[in-house]
Image (cartoon, helix red, strand yellow):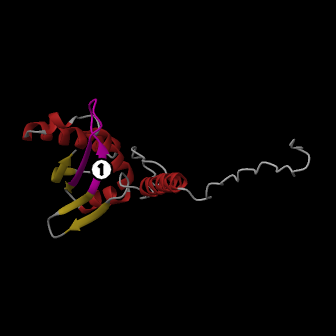
């Protein structure tokens, strides 16, 4: 008996159903978390540094960053006239990136000199930081070396402001990194 192939209905081969991967896979989750972490770190860095570090101190300070944010205290008593600068920060001289953070007191001979220093404090601080930034920390280790720096500061201030009579300059706090 012959079999006629036409008599049996032909069955179409069934298509294999394609299994679509789920939209959220482990690899996508890891990728999204990595991108999120990078965005968070960059946001934190931008927030922390405020868009950039300004290392120069000029006579037009606005007290907006660590290098320009300082306190000035005028001290006047019966026979004592002084101006104390607190939290001064400047770059140190030399090839390495190092910084000084210091407090400095300028003792004057009279009340008018003290008032002049307070009135011109931005320029005075620019002069002081200019002197400090020329000396690397290795040249500030001994008392004679620091005295030489203080003498140069006094000459710079007296050169620009001849009416200011300085009795002495003292470091009341001195750190470097």
Q: Residue at x 37, y 59 (%)?
A: 119
Please, what secondary structure does the residue beneath circle 1 have? strand
**Is residue 41 or residue 92 the one in the foreground?**
41
Q: Residue at x 46, y 58 (%)?
A: 47
Q: Quadrant of the C terminus?
A: top left
Residue 151 position, x and y percent, is 18, 40
Is 116 magenta? The answer is no
- With 112 as the anchor, is 19 left or right in this view? right
User: Is 142 above or below relative to 27?
Assistant: above
User: Is 135 above or below relative to 117?
Assistant: above
Q: Residue at x 49, y 56 (%)?
A: 33
Residue 132 position, x and y percent, is 26, 41
Is 93 magenta? The answer is yes
**Is residue 4 or residue 126 the one in the foreground?**
4
Circle 1 Cα neighbour tier, 10 Å, few/some/many (<14 / 14–19 / ≥20): many
Residue 32 position, x and y percent, is 53, 55
Q: Residue furthest left?
A: 143
**Is residue 38 or residue 7 the one in the foreground?**
7
- With 23 as the anchor, is 126 left or right in this view? left
Residue 35 position, x and y percent, is 52, 52
Q: Residue at x 65, y 54 (%)?
A: 19
Circle 1 sits on which residue?
Answer: 89
Q: Residue furthest right?
A: 6
Instruction: Report which quarter residue 94 is drawn in.
Output: top left
**Is residue 120 or residue 161 the one in the foreground?**
120
Stretch in magenta = 87-104
Q: Residue furthest top?
A: 95
Q: Main secondary structure of the magenta part?
A: strand
Q: Quadrant of the N terminus?
A: top right
- With 159 as the anchor, is 60 left or right in this view? right
């Amino acid at each position: 008996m012959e079999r006629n192939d036409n008599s049996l209905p032909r069955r179409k081969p069934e298509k294999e159903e394609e299994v679509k991967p789920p939209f959220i896979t482990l690899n996508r989750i890891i990728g999204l978390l990595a991108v999120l972490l990078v965005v968070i770190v960059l946001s934190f860095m931008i927030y922390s540094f405020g868009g950039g570090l300004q290392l120069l101190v000029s006579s037009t300070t606005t007290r907006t960053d660590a290098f320009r944010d300082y306190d000035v205290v005028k001290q006047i008593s019966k026979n004592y006239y002084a101006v104390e600068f607190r939290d001064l920060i400047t770059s140190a001289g030399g090839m390495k990136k190092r910084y000084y953070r210091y407090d400095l007191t300028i003792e004057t001979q009279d009340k008018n000199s003290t008032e002049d220093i307070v009135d011109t404090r931005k320029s005075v601080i620019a002069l002081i930081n200019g002197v400090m930034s020329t000396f690397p920390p290795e040249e500030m280790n001994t008392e004679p070396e620091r005295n030489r720096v203080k003498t140069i500061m006094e000459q710079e201030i007296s050169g620009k402001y001849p009416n200011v009579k300085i009795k002495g300059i003292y470091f009341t706090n001195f750190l470097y990194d």
